[in-house]
Image: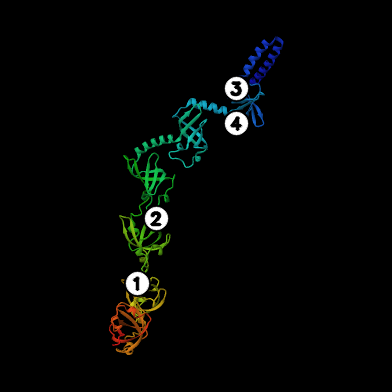
Amino acid sequence: MPKFIERIRVIDDVLLAQEMEAALGPDAGSALKTALEGEINRFETRQIVTGFIVGEHNDAVVVDVGYKSEGIVPREEFAAEESTVGSKVQVMIVEIMPNGEMLLSKRQADLEIGWKGVLGNTKEGDRVKGRVVRKIKGGLLVDIGVPVFLPASQVDLRRAPDVGEYIGQIVEAEIIKIDGERKNIVVSRRKVLEEERKKNRENLVKELHVGDLREGQVKNITDFGAFIDLGGLDGLLHITDMSWGRVNHPSEVVSLGQKIEVVVLDYDAERNRISLGLKQKTRNPWEDIGDRYPIGSVREGEVVNLMNYGAFVRLEPGIEGLVHISEMSWTKQIAHPSEQVKVADKVKVMILDINHDKQEISLGMKQAERNPWETIGERYPVGNIIKGTVRNVTNYGAFVEIEEGIEGLLHVNDISWTKKLTHPSPDVNKGDVLTCKILDIDKERQRISLGLKQLLNDPWTTDIPEKLKKGMTVDGKVTKITNFGVFIEILDGLEGLLHVSEISDEPVEKPEELLKVDQVVKVKVINVDFDLRKIGLSMKTG
């Protein structure tokens, strides 16, 4: 090989110079020696030289660059096809050892040559293409022949959540800064995208029409809708235009980054505002709603939402109706819809009304079932004896359930023939199982009147006239004290009134100071009114 032979020749000439110095004297030999050593000393570190691959040794490639000994390059710096013996290669001198060995680098030579090419052929504002190599602090490293820095803020139009997703991709970017001395180049992909977006916007404005179908990408999602990037212009897909049915949040219909086809509903060129629709791509299910759901017809639906005032039931995709809380049961007083139904329940409903303008349907659950009050008189004729459970107690009476959802009122006046009750307790309490008589049924007002005392004979027409006479003295027990007098129990539950004026011969202002509840006293019957069912008593001596 010429270079190898040339190197041997140079070394031999140095030896020859040494011999000449011994034979001819120091001046002649030194002159030749100096000239030859100058040729060898032309090599220096950081210098790029051309050589030939002459072989391999361990993990290194041996390269002859015309020096007195071969140089070595790490094997890893070569591709497989680049390390063929005899191949020409450019390398950088990394270090010249005292023993004459030379350390070389192909990678550093390539990088240096690359930088010279990039710095000599490009300027700020130029566009370059390169492969994203790896993620580094603050952004990405892109190989355009030399490594350049792509800041995270310049990767896309919006800051990417993870710039690592771009590793391995070929990207086009604009050079925004060149530092030749430090060999530092900063590029921006965002600037390229913004220019393309501007061109797309100009073209889009010219050809955009209401009613067009356009493909876009979901750019942002809010509570009221989603912004769709149409490729230069953003349009709003409002939540009400996503579906003919109920949408609680836009994220139920679209997701960030999703590609979606939408309809252009409106375009305000002056304000650059575009309204988009998704549901408009399909037929409006409300168009023939009256034909498909006649008023009075019964359908099955699914409960999709509960509110304080009722439940929304889906009849089909895009069609929902409201069952008001008052339309859920014929018999129960419902405080909240959850007492009757839950979300995802399948229920039968009747179509009660349709408002086409507001796209609202009124539904009834109870109307889809037989009204139990229509046949209440047949099942519980007046005068019948029934058995029921006390579900609630009030001052004026007790509500007794005679079947599920059907309750009758046992009024306080119908508990006892003889006691003057102001509250059902202690005679009647919640949870008690009672046997009562049906006294009256009001189907229109859905009320049933019950009686307890009516199961017994009326003592006022049987026993009392015979056992109680005016003027007789009897033993009694104080049951209740009021400001106008004291009630005394006589004759097994029969009560009479001891008026405050009849307690003593002396004036009495506070009956409780003279008498106590459960106290046994002797009283005189001074009056018996069978019509009003009242008995007057007296404790006066005169």
Instruction: Determine crowd level at label 3: few under 14, some 14-19, many 20+ residues with C-alpha closer than 10 A.
Output: some
Residue at 38 percent of width and 76 percent of height: 425
Q: Name the amino acid, label 1.
A: Trp
Earlier along the polypeptide chain: callout 1 or callout 3? 3
**Residue that label 2 marks:** 317
The Cα–Cα distance between marks 4 and 1, rounded to whole angstroms, is 95 Å
Which sits in the foreground, 327 or 212?
327
Q: Earlier in the sequence, mark 1 or mark 2?
A: 2
Question: Comparing marks 4 and 3, which lies closer to the viewer?
Answer: 3
Judging from the image, the colouring scheme is rainbow
Q: Is residue 296 above or below residue 427?
A: above
Task: Give the residue pinned by disc 1.
Answer: 373
Q: Position of residue 370 (x, y in %)?
A: 36, 69
Query: Which quarter shows the N terminus?
Result: top right
Disc with the residue nearer the chain's start (4 vs 3): 3
Q: Which amino acid type corresponds to the residue marked 2 in the rendered image?
A: Pro
| Residues at circles 2 and 4 in contact by the CB criterion of under 8 Å | no
Q: CA distance from mark 1 to mark 3?
A: 112 Å
In this figure, which residue is indicated by the disc labeled 3? 44
Q: Amino acid at mark 4?
A: Glu
Cβ–Cβ under 8 Å for marks 4 and 3: no
Helix, strand, or loop for circle 1? helix
Say which of marks 4 and 1 sits in front. 4
Q: Secondary structure at mark 3?
A: loop
Quadrant assignment, res 202: top left
Which residue is painted at 69% across and 10% down in the image? 25
Residue highlighted by disc 4: 77
